[in-house]
Image (tube, rainbow, N blue to C red):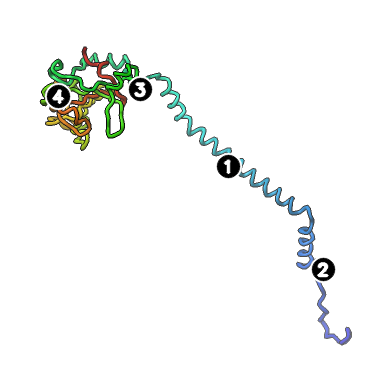
Amino acid sequence: MNEENKPNGQETPKSNPGGSTAGASSWKRLLAKKWFSPAAFMAAAAIIVTLMWLYQGSGQLEMTEDNQPGQEAAEGSSETGEQPGVIDEETLEVLAGNETMQWPVLNRDELVIATPFYEAQASEEERQAAMVQVGNTFTAHMGIDFTQADDQPFDVLAAMSGKVSHVEQHPVSGYIVEITHPESVVTIYQGVSDVTVKTGDEVKQGTIIAKSGRNELEKDLGNHLHFEIRQNGEAINPDALLPE
């Protein structure tokens, strides 16, 4: 059919040079360029690095602000200059102002110190005498062990007024009684028997709180009392506080 024979109002369809086919061809030509892939990679990397830098910067700021109180506390604790296990003069004054610590037994002269307190500055012979063997291990003795020549039980007294903070029957160490005093000082009476106090009791100096006893840890000593003094958990040589 020629042009003259076509029905009126109908035209032959024509291609569209500016359509989607042309757009796809342009992108293909762009992607085919050798410089396109490296350039796209560099742009993406720059965006990622920028985002990471912004995120890390804000995180460091928050950490610095949060850590300031902790840093101040650490610096404050280092300024005390106190040595662990050494009772300071201020504590001695406070304790002396209330009471003078006494021996935890009634007749000190009738008792023997079977195992002394371990002092690192003592002679080698004294250090060896202050070692306790547990199985195949030797440990430093952090208290004083009292015994009586006839191996009979004797009264155990509160060395200073205070509050009974702990009472326990340990399978190896026997009965343990702890009394808390001013300045975080605690006296410990270990391996005792016939305990007469309970946790929470207020006791006066010289009150009978138990009797000496036996335990598995130091069974070779027979009937005895293991006595300790601690301040803030650190062992103190009783000789520093007890009368001569």
Q: Which residue is mark 2?
A: 17
Q: Amino acid at mark 3?
A: Pro
Say whether disc 4 or disc 1 marks the residue closer to the N-terminus.
Answer: 1
**Residue contact between numbered discs 2 and 1, judged by CB atoms under 8 Å:** no
Q: Is residue 191 left or right of residue 9?
A: left
Say whether disc 2 or disc 3 marks the residue closer to the N-terminus.
Answer: 2
Marks 2, 4: nearer the viewer: 4
Question: Which residue is drawn at the image coordinates 64% and 47% (left, top)?
Answer: 48
Disc 4 versus disc 3: distance between alpha carbons? 28 Å
**Local SS, label 1:** helix
Q: Amino acid at mark 1?
A: Tyr
Q: Which residue is mark 1?
A: 55
Q: Which residue is mark 3?
A: 84
Q: Amino acid at mark 2?
A: Pro
Question: Which residue is drawn at the image coordinates 30% and 24% (left, top)?
Answer: 235
**Residue contact between numbered discs 2 and 3, judged by CB atoms under 8 Å:** no
Asked if residue 169 is positioned above or below residue 131 in the image, the reply reads below
Disc 4 versus disc 1: distance between alpha carbons? 66 Å
Say whether disc 2 or disc 1 marks the residue closer to the N-terminus.
Answer: 2
Marks 1, 3: nearer the viewer: 3
Bin the neighbour count of mark 2 within 10 Å (Cα to Cα): few under 14, some 14-19, many 20 and up: few
Asked if residue 2 is positioned above or below residue 78 in the image, the reply reads below
